[in-house]
Image (cartoon, rainbow, N blue to C red):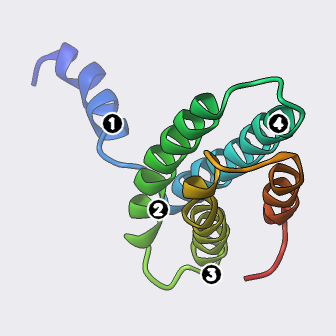
Amino acid sequence: MQWWILLILPLVGAGCGQTPDDAVDEGTKAVDSWHKTLEMTCRQWAEYQVPTLYVKQTMKAGEEVLSKKLQDLEKLGSDQEAQRVEAKIHRLQYWVEQNQDALEKADGVKRHQILAALPREGEGP
């Protein structure tokens, strides 16, 4: 066996998937980050500081990232930590689904109601 193969093997092995703990950590970071991003964006939107289109685009981007993380977590099956993060993602996705169509017609009061309906971090299912 040539010496350079010994150097490459660990690198190849490291790239072959992630551990369950890594998937849970990445999922947790993603959902927490997107929660804060959506909260900040909607707070600015509620105060008429950013346009509705920006909020819609932010929601869409968050959904795409979180859907990928959800798929990674669902591969872990009955792992309790993964299921906890999955539930957080589902809550945030549900909020987006319930509110994205209402953005266009929202007046000042409705904008604050949409923001207030955003699930709190750590909130139960």
The residue at the far top in this view is: 4
What is the number of the mark on residue 70? 2
Structural crowding at the residue carrying mark 4, measured as other residues with C-alpha within 10 Å and reported as few (<14), some (14–19) or many (≥20): few
Report the Cα–Cα distance between label 2 and label 4.
Answer: 23 Å
Q: Amino acid at mark 2?
A: Leu
Q: Secondary structure at mark 2?
A: helix
Position of 20 compared to 5: left or right?
right
Q: Secondary structure at mark 1?
A: loop
| Label whose residue precedes the other's in the sequence (2 or 1) | 1
Structural crowding at the residue carrying mark 3, measured as other residues with C-alpha within 10 Å and reported as few (<14), some (14–19) or many (≥20): few
Q: Is residue 34 above or below residue 114?
A: above
- Screen quadrant of the C terminus: bottom right
Front-most of residues 117 and 23: 117
Q: Amino acid at mark 4?
A: Met
- Residue 69 location (% of width, % of height): 47, 54
Q: Residue at x 33, y 32 (%)?
A: 10
Q: Is residue 91 above or below residue 121?
A: below
What is the number of the mark on residue 36? none
What is the number of the mark on residue 15? 1
Kindly report which numbered mark, 2 or 4, lies closer to the viewer in this rendering: 4
Q: Which residue is mark 3?
A: 80
- Residue 28 location (% of width, % of height): 67, 54
